[in-house]
């Protein structure tokens, strides 16, 4: 019962949605949209679960003075600041429990939640994202070594496209006569991106697409049930 | 599986950091190859007679500023240098501020240019395609007032401007829809007036086909690279050029490290071969 | 008969010469009866204004749209219900505002039971489903099914062994998307197999997740694996934990874990975005053996470049079949392979037809 | 006062920017602080976001404002509560009901979505006549597109050993995959460096005011 009913639910919903795709008639046509909205609400509740797990792990660390427990205080404090500000005075145009907090906004310029969002959260996010500029360089240095045909292709394609993207790349081959224009670096990089790269990406998409289709079907049929966990 | 002896990757990080930061501070101005599409835009402005009026539409928001803002700056600078009058419109709400910002930046260089005489900001109008189409019938009906609420009949610049026939060319700085595509379909295809524009690097593949023999678009500024080229043509190097310099230098650093890595690899391999022969 | 034809001919020539305009209302096909298509052509008149009106329940005609073009199609989807009849009226006005001409039309909105435009999709759905189910059943009846080597998976045993030897943990990341992505589920399935090995060797496992629904599922999966391995007491419920839903916040946290815990092996199996390279490079710097797998075409290059082993695209989904050798899974894989074979054949036929300028197949498949 | 908080905000931003960058050198207490602030703030952000952007507009408002039309929304609310049953070990199995609904929905939707956009549409997009229009460069490109897609798909064929003619075809497929990985890597470099440029423009412009707009 604990396992059968969920499997029946999955089967019914899955089959229903596939059939509904071909039936415009009510209520089938709008079914998937409605169910996806349900998913949104359920995940909204689920997020509480995650937060509780976060709180539990960190209070545990503090309570038992585990390694680096001081940092957990920072985690909890940041969490409560953000949630507190958000719930008390709202964010943007939404009001919180105490309305819009005009008095505070008059002092710091915007709502406290938005202040933290703009001045701390966004910078942290953008900086973390920008680490990629460094890692792309270190990964390229380490991995783009021409050991065999495959790694040579990887290496050459990367270098040609990178050169084509710079102003220098254009200048390097700008002396080429009109008849050899196709060897002009920006043109070469465009060629690689439009044809062989698209082909490779397409093959991956098709394979992965079939993989997803197969997994979906296995789940609907109840063959793949790892998501349900133990008995 | 032994990890080869390698340069500490923190040196790579440091070089990348400097390679990006320094060109932003010290303007290097690496030589830039002018591509055909940018040259076409430049010539469009060059061949526009002095005193004629053009329309520049700001169809983007702050998210696309790094790419499109320098284009707007150089284009307006070019127009002012050539004594071309400019009418600003915006198909995106935030576009109005973008235009204002560009005018404020250029003000110190062109103190003599007067609002209402040499340029005017008509503000934002919703409706996209429909609005663009209606401008072709009667501009003053669509924009009875400028962005500050003054009737546009008051301004000398608007005296002779009624529709696209009185406009030398239309230029759209576009980050999506409504934008350059809509302008092409109406101004170029329907009214047969010269149309040009600038777009982000990401949307370039979709817009480039309009630069064709029918001249649906007279040239196109696509992405940061084109913005840098235009800055070079106008002769005032700005953030696009330094951004592009930073890009080029960072790319070259990465490529040099790849080269070093490969040289090391080959050396080691040759050595191993020799050792084996012994 | 002939008379009727002559009459019709005359009628139509009068229509043509008398500057008639066309106005029709049709039910929109292949929908749930919530839209009407209005077609008009008033180019002979070149009116200044064209107004489309619809009768409301009280019998008054209300304007629903000013039409700006002389001819075209307009879809009225505003408050249209299946089974009801609607009356429309189109009026043409000249510059001064005088009515030049007017026409009306009536139509009943209908809902359809089958969307004919999706026939090609339906055929493909049936073929694929049938193939996969057929092979699953044939595998069940004991037929031996071959699966080629997936080199990305050879690392598993080695990684667990190495971690045990070094006394360091194993890190597993099931991607950064929620449970509504198949890659996450594929990742969790592999996690089940991995956790079983980990339980046998009694090594420490770390599974930080960034979605709470993944959290509860991952917990169940790991717990069950320990149970299956006969070592349920070794299961630590806190080995699976939530960090944050935020993409880069999560990465910041995981990076910290990698640097401090120095896992002997990292597994990144699931859906990844830009964080892929940040994770893989940090992991490399800590000296972990790294296995990655994703079906995100945009992130695969980074995993291929920065990790020791990579499951490319569909290999991620094939992995659980490969590891378990479960006939159901293998059968399904075989069905997918048939899908690929069909794909290759249909594509070849399509290209050949295109070369000979025959577009039937392409048009048929692009219908939906 | 507002000006002070504006300036303070920029300093905060600069501090956390450097805190994250410091990780590139090595793990250190400042990064640890930034990391924990990031985890805590973002978890809090998503919590608040969920309440204001999902629970209130998609559940609370429809039910309280127009119950008769939106009563059906009670079901996801109940399922959501079932999800929370996971907190109590004895009732935790109840959470399988909402999960199974989510997974069922996902499977049905994804099955069709991927069949349509990743299989059939990619197939029709590859059905081209390589020999018409354009220069010989374009013809070669289009041939590569068709051959690359076909051989790439062959590489993903699992139920046959990769040997003989079949193996060589799969090999060609791998070559195309490698080119596409290299090119995509090289192409992305530009976008990633732009991110760093953006960061440095903040540090050098907004914070230090060395460079103008």
Image (cartoon, coloured by chain):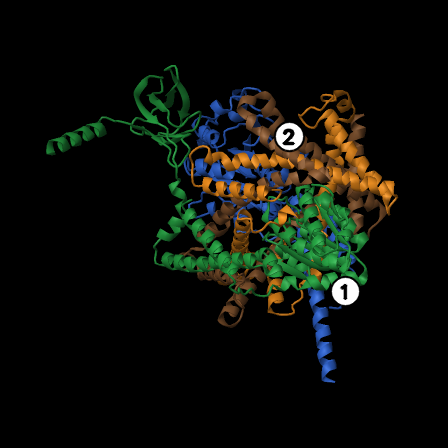
Chain colours: A orange, B blue, C green, D brown
Quarter of the image containing the N terminus of chain B?
Answer: bottom right
Q: Which mark is residue A195?
A: none
Q: Count the marks.
A: 2
Near-viewer residue (A152 or A35): A35
Seen from this angle, which residue lies furthest front?
A1
Look at mark 1 in the image and give the residue it sits on.
B6
Which chain is home to disc 2? D
The image shows residue D36, relative to residue B32, as above or below, that is above
How crowded pointer 2 is (Cα within 10 Å; few <14, some 14-19, many 20+) is rated as many
Query: Residue A84: image x %, image y %?
Result: 76, 29
Query: Residue B210: image x %, image y %?
Result: 47, 45
The label nearer to you, 1 versus 2, is 2
Q: Which mark is residue D55?
A: 2
Which chain is home to disc 1? B
- Identify the element where label 1 is drawn: loop
Question: Is residue C344 in view from this perspective?
Answer: yes
Q: Is circle 1 on the same chain as circle 2?
A: no
- Which residue is at a point 81% across and 33% down the rendered structure image? D8
- The answer to which image quadrant residue B42 occupies is top right
Near-viewer residue (C329 or A159): C329
How crowded pointer 1 is (Cα within 10 Å; few <14, some 14-19, many 20+) is rated as few
Query: Residue B109: image x %, image y %?
Result: 66, 35
**Is disc 1 in contact with disc 2, using a CB cutoff of under 8 Å?**
no
């Amino acid at each position: 019962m604990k396992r059968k009913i969920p499997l029946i639910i999955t089967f019914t919903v899955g089959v229903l949605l596939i059939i509904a795709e071909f039936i415009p008639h009510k209520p089938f046509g709008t079914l998937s949209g409605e169910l996806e909205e349900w998913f949104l609400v359920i995940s909204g509740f689920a997020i509480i679960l995650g937060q509780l797990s976060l709180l539990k792990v960190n209070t545990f660390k503090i309570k038992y003075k585990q390694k680096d427990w001081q940092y957990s205080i920072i985690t909890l404090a940041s969490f409560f600041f953000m949630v507190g500000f958000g719930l008390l005075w709202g964010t943007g145009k939404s009001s919180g429990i105490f309305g819009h907090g005009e008095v505070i906004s008059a002092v710091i310029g915007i709502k406290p939640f938005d202040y933290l969002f703009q001045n701390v959260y966004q910078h942290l996010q953008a900086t973390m994202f920008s680490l990629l500029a460094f890692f792309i360089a270190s990964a390229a240095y380490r991995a783009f070594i021409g050991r065999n045909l495959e790694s040579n292709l990887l290496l050459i394609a990367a270098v040609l496209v990178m050169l084509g993207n710079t102003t220098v790349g254009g200048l390097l081959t700008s002396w080429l006569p009109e008849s050899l224009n196709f060897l002009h670096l920006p043109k070469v990089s465009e060629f690689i991106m439009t044809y062989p790269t698209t082909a490779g990406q397409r093959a991956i998409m098709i394979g992965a697409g079939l993989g997803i289709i197969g997994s979906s079907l296995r789940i609907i049929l109840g063959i793949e049930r790892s998501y349900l966990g133990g008995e | 599986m032994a990890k080869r002896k390698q340069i500490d990757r923190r040196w790579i990080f440091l070089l990348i950091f400097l390679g990006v930061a320094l060109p932003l501070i010290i303007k290097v101005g690496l030589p830039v190859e002018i591509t055909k599409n940018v040259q076409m835009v430049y010539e469009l402005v060059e061949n526009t007679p002095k005193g004629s009026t053009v329309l520049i539409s700001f169809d983007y928001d702050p998210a696309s500023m790094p790419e499109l803002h320098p284009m707007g700056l150089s284009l307006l600078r070019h127009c002012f240098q050539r004594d071309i009058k400019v009418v600003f419109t915006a198909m995106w709400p935030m576009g109005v501020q973008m235009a204002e910002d560009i005018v404020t930046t250029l003000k110190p260089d062109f103190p003599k240019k007067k609002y209402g005489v040499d340029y005017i900001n008509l503000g934002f109008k919703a409706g996209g395609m429909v609005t663009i189409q209606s401008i072709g019938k009667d501009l003053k009906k669509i924009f009875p007032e400028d962005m500050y609420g003054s009737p546009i009949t008051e301004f000398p610049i608007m005296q002779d401007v009624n529709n696209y026939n009185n406009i030398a060319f239309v230029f759209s700085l576009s980050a999506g829809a409504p934008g350059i595509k809509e302008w092409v379909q109406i101004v170029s295809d329907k009214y047969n007036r010269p149309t040009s524009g600038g777009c982000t690097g990401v949307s370039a593949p979709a817009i480039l086909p309009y630069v064709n023999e029918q001249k649906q678009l007279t040239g196109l500024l696509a992405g940061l690279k084109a913005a840098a080229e235009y800055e070079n043509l106008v002769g005032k190097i700005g953030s696009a050029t330094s951004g592009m310099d930073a890009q080029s230098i960072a790319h070259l650093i990465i490529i040099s490290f790849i080269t070093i890595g490969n040289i090391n690899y080959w050396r080691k391999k040759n050595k191993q071969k020799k050792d084996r022969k012994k | 008969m002939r008379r009727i034809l002559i009459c019709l001919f005359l009628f139509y020539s009068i229509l043509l010469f008398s500057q008639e305009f066309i106005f029709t209302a049709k039910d929109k096909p292949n929908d749930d009866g919530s839209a009407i298509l209005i077609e008009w052509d008033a180019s002979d008149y070149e009116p200044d204004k064209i107004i489309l009106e619809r009768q409301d329940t009280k019998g008054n005609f209300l304007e629903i749209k000013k039409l700006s073009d002389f001819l075209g199609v307009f879809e009225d989807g505003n408050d249209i219900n299946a089974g009801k009849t609607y009356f429309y009226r189109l009026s043409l006005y000249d510059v001064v505002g005088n009515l030049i001409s007017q026409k009306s039309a009536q139509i009943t909105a209908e809902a359809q039971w089958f969307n004919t435009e999706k026939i090609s999709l339906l055929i493909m759905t049936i073929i694929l489903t049938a193939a996969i189910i057929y092979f699953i059943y044939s595998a069940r009846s004991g037929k031996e099914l071959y699966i080629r080597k997936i080199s990305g998976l050879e690392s598993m045993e080695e990684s667990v062994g190495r971690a045990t030897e070094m006394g360091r943990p194993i890190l597993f990341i099931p991607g950064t998307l929620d449970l509504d992505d198949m890659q996450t589920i594929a990742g969790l399935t592999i996690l089940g197999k991995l956790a079983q090995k980990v339980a046998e060797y009694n090594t420490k496992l770390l599974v930080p997740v960034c979605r709470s629904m993944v959290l509860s599922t991952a917990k169940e999966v790991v717990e069950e694996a320990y149970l299956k391995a006969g070592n349920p007491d070794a299961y630590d419920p806190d080995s699976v934990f939530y960090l944050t839903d935020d993409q880069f916040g999560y990465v910041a946290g995981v990076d910290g874990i990698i640097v401090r815990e120095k896992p002997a092996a990292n597994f990144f199996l699931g859906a990844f975005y830009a964080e892929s390279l940040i994770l893989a490079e940090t992991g490399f710097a800590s000296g972990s053996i790294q296995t990655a797998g994703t079906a995100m075409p945009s992130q695969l290059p980074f995993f291929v470049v920065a990790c020791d082993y990579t499951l490319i695209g569909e290999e991620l989904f094939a992995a659980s079949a490969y590891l378990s050798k479960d006939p159901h899974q293998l059968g399904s894989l075989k069905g997918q392979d048939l899908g690929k074979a069909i794909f290759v054949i249909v594509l070849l036929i399509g290209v050949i037809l295109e070369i000979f300028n025959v577009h039937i197949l392409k048009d048929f498949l692009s219908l939906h | 006062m507002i000006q002070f908080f504006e300036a303070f905000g920029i300093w905060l931003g600069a501090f956390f920017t450097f805190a994250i960058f410091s990780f590139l050198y090595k793990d250190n207490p400042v990064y640890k602080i930034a990391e924990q602030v990031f985890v805590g703030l973002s978890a809090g952000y998503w919590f608040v976001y969920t309440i204001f952007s999902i629970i209130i507009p998609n559940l609370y408002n429809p039910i309280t404002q127009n119950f008769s039309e939106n009563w059906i929304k009670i079901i996801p609310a109940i399922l959501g509560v079932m999800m929370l049953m996971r907190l109590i070990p004895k009732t935790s199995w109840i959470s399988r009901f909402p999960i199974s609904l989510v997974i069922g929905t996902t499977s049905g939707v994804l099955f069709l979505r991927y069949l349509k956009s990743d299989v059939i549409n990619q197939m029709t997009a590859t059905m081209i006549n390589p020999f018409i229009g354009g220069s010989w460069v374009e013809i070669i490109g289009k041939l590569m597109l068709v051959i690359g897609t076909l051989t790439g798909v062959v590489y993903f064929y699992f139920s046959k050993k990769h040997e003989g003619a079949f193996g060589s075809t799969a090999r060609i497929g791998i070559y195309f995959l490698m080119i596409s990985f290299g090119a995509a890597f090289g192409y992305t470099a530009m976008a990633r460096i732009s991110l760093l440029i953006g960061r440095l423009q903040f540090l050098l412009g907004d914070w230090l005011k060395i460079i103008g707009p």
